[in-house]
Image: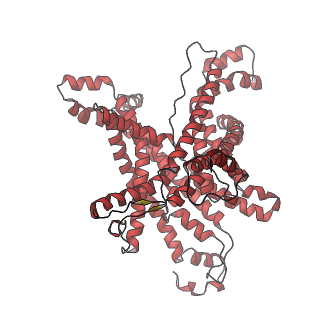
Amino acid sequence: MFSYCSAPETLDGLVWLSCYLTTGKHIAFYGAFGTVLVLLAITAPTALAFGFGGAVAARSRIAPLRWLGNGYIAIVRGVPDIAFFLFFVIALDQGFEYLRHQVLCPEWTDPVRQGTDFIVCPDAKLPLSSAPQWIHEGYGFALAILTFAIVFGAFAANVLYGAMRAVPRAQIETAEAYGMTPRQTFRRVVVPQMWIYALPGLGNLWMVLIKATPLLFLLGVEDIVFWARELGAAKTPRFSDYPHGDWRMWYFLALLIFYLAFTRISEIVIARLTTRLSHGQATAAGEALRKAAA
Amino acid sequence: MSCLQTIADYGLRSLGYGERLLPRTDFTLCQQVTLIGSGMIWNVYFGLIALSAGFLFATALAVGKASANPLARKPAEWFIFVFRGSPLFIQFFFGYFVFLSLKQAVPAMEPLAGAALGALVVLFLNTAAYSGEIFYGALRSVPKGDLEAAEAYGMTGWRKFRRITWPTMLRLAWPAYTNEAILLFQSTTLVFFSGFPARQQMGDALYYAQYFADKTFNPFVPYPILALWFIGLTLCIIGTMGAINRRLNRHLPQAPSRPRFLPQMIR
């Protein structure tokens, strides 16, 4: 990166370190932190949407829909999540390929599952074998996001379901007294008021989501764990300009500190958000704020 | 090959007894159930020992965090912050590489670099931090009247703690602690995915489930089997912890509230 880095074996001390930490692979490592943030930025709203859908389904008046919502919440919550991560990545991939196979190759007669092989017609492969590399990586990442969203959606559904039931009964009765239909009551009264009740649970979930991001590594995405193992492993002078011993311990220490800082900042932001959302709410915190202002 | 024969061959495979080679072709349902069940031995081993050792340490941490003396409070606060604020997965990796370096410096430390001891140490520290926070919360909600009554009876110091504060703390913390226990058992599945090597393919339940999923390319059989094993284990934990909960609350007039399973999953 720097001009003086052309002959690293002659350097030492901090100068060497400044060259070492700006090699191409290290830049990719720093980029992987961006991957984690992108994952969080996409997964959090997606999971919230899944959760909202699940919660609405779970309190639906139509029985099959209610069973579906409750089943989704119960099944995902009862089993170790990493089993779900490993399961969904293959299951989703095979599911998509199977659907495409049905649509694209109706004349194909061989069974899809032959012994230990899963064979779909070449047109149905996802991504197509002719696709460029970035599509393969993007597809893997999209599958990972969908998996995270499904698993965390179930937890969010549970939180939102509880929050919807926590909205004071009197508020809903008032809405009904004004002649609102159930749909209007839900949209105008329940949804705006439920967030303050959902916030502690959602904040907790956000922390858990942050701490689940290293599992991306298990889903085959080149994330920070992948790069930390790669870069930290011992390097010999034959294969690297920057030979060093086994430094994986230090790389993982850096990741540990990154996550600690991240969760700490989140904690502070959530605390501020709670205060802000409590304004004008019929809760103890809202009452305390009103008294402090008066 | 009959199913009984399979159980005899693979029932203790995760500990290294029985058939040396894992099945390679023609996987039967019986083989999958047996091997994944055999892997559960490791999950139970990790969970049980980490939980019981962590319980004592967690009590110490909670008392430390609630202490007025900063020399006791600060270390406890930091310990809990570090282990609750970072992912268990990263802690496993970090622990493993620390133990590897230790092994090079001091050869006597070698067992720590294996899963059986090294992962256990990480799990123990992790669960101690999470339960310590739970106990700390409970310690702060011990009713003031109980403590005053203890003092009126002339109890102080250790006697007061052992006979009043600690039992009340446990009683208050127990439902949350039940969840922690369930989550701990579930997070034991991370061990063999985080650096710790599975020597001679002796792994835990998820390790074998993934083995079958990779070999058959069919996730719809091994993972549901794993899920059923875990649901069974969870029911056992809920049963045991519920029995302890009833005993802790036996002096109370009303029926004890059943601990609810409100998982927080991964950490």
Which residue occupies the extreme front position in the image? B1
Q: Position of residue B250 (x, y in %)?
A: 63, 17
**Image height of A61 relative to B31, above or below:** above
State the image quarter where residue A226 is shown.
bottom right
Residue A38 or residue B225, whichever sits in front:
B225
Observer able to see residue B38: yes
Q: Position of residue A265 (x, y in %)?
A: 49, 50
Q: Position of residue A223 (x, y in %)?
A: 50, 63
Image quarter where the C terminus of chain A lies is top left
Apparent side of residue A219 relative to residue A103 in the rendered image (left or right): right
Q: How many marks?
A: 0
**Image height of A58 relative to A96, above or below:** above
- Residue beneath the point at 67% across and 50% down: B10
Which residue occupies the extreme right position in the image? B108
Residue A160 or residue B205, whichever sits in front:
B205
Residue B112 or residue A80, whichever sits in front:
A80
**Image height of B185 relative to B207, above or below:** above
Q: Position of residue B28 (x, y in %)?
A: 56, 51
Apparent side of residue A137 relative to residue A23 in the rendered image (left or right): left
Residue B92 or residue A6, whichever sits in front:
B92
Which residue occupies the extreme left position in the image? A179
- The colouring scheme, among rainbow, by chain, secondary structure or one colour, is secondary structure
State the image quarter where residue B181 is shown.
top right
**Image height of B97 relative to A205, above or below:** below
Observer able to see residue A196: no
